[in-house]
Amino acid sequence: MTHNYDWLNTESTALEHVGLRRHLRTVMSAPTGTVNLDGRDVVLLGSNNYLGLSTHPKVIDAAIAATQTFGTGASGSRLISGNSELYTTLEVNLAKTKDTEAALVFSSGYAANTSVIPVLADEGDLILSDALNHASIIDGCRLSRATKKVYRHCDVEHLKTLLSESTAFRRRLIVTDGVFSMDGDVAPLPDIYEVAKHYEAMLLVDDAHGFGVLGKDGSGTVAHFGLEGTDIIRMGTLSKAVGALGGYIAGSHALIQLLINKARSFIFTTGLPPATLAAANAALDVIRSSPELRQRLFSHARHLKMALIDLGYTLLPSETQILPVVLGSPQRATSVADALLAEGVFAPAIRPPAVPPDTSRLRLTVMATHTEAEIQQAIAGFAAVLPESR
Ligand SMILES: *Cc1c(COP(=O)(O)O)cnc(C)c1O
């Protein structure tokens, strides 16, 4: 009996002591307004299925039809034999939605960020990254051999200062979330774009949470600000409002060509399943033709936000469907989440490293497909646990 692996338990116990140990919960139904969690029905306030498209009949039909025609797996990487025509259809649809020359689909948003950033910035280049950018951006920066500098969250003056101090670099890349994943605020893209133009820097916007939700026809944060015609590189995911799986980059033909040749997470992995590609493609059409889903989403977000503020909860000033209730320590966030669950409300606690220290929170998200009754039930749950949250 060796002890080579004893450190595994030691490390998990250490996480437990600081309130940062994670446990998996089992969801036994589709991610709709009410889910069956470990055998019990609870209102779900923690899903990124913002428009409910993962269970939309047209989307499910498309996934079934694609499986019947193409089978269950891609059976190869896209550069070898896995590039089915479903990819072409989806990428044409994405480029049209994002108003760019071309688009390229990756296996996930995580995979897209971790290889797009190293392709755009290498040794001798500089990356400027918002302090609250998503972990996949941080990992993309780590994989790049470029120099990295972090600017204060949404602080365009700080970004300007860093750019003006760094003229010796060959190329410069600014990268930001469009809608910040844990805060729900929106990056000041018009100002960031102005600065990028002035300093001749590239700009990459990760629109994981804006796509399907903000802008004309739900096409995202760039469109929300009327910046469609620009050379901003748009990254996003098909796993949130689109309800499927996959990441994408939308931009120029030149960019997409280089990514096909150099993006390692594109080259060295198997293509997505046919069902996933067809579902995403059908979901894009539903998004374009269903403004009422976005209206319902925002009406639910406003309703829940106002009710929680009236009850005395502190929310970050989010403008979107993401409503962060900041509670401080990880222990406090988990105990409030547990109390809410006992009241039938599933609002997962988010702790470091997903958020900065001392800002552990409940990250509430609403869905267009929540009923009024479910939102009401959630509010009643928050009213019941209020004393514990103080
Ligand atoms: C979820 C998320 C990703 C990763 O997307 P996946 O498709 O889930 O891998 C990237 N960026 C942001 C801002 C996200 O919220």
Image (spheres, rainbow, N blue to C red):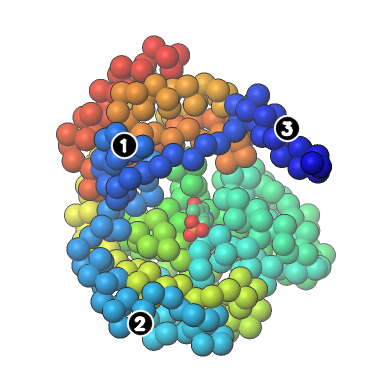
Name which of mark 2 and mark 1 comes first in the sequence.
Answer: 1
Residue 180 drawn above or below residue 327: below
Residue 305 or residue 386, whichever sits in front: 386
Q: Can you identify the residue that label 3 sits on? A: 10
In this view, the residue in front, 6 or 168, is: 6
Q: Which residue is mark 1?
A: 39
Instruction: Tell me which residue sits at (36%, 44%) in the image.
Output: 27
Per the image, label 2 sits on a secondary structure element best described as helix
Which residue shows up at 49% across the image and 80% down it? Answer: 75
Q: Secondary structure at mark 1?
A: loop
Q: Which residue is mark 2?
A: 70
Label 3 crowd bin: few (<14), some (14–19), many (20+), radius 10 Å: few
Q: Is 256 placed left or right of 48 in the picture?
A: right
CB contact under 8 Å: marks 3 and 1: no
Q: Residue at x 54, y 30 (%)?
A: 360
Q: What is the three-letter code of the residue carrying label 3?
A: Thr
Comparing labels 2 and 1, the label whose residue is closer to the camera? 1
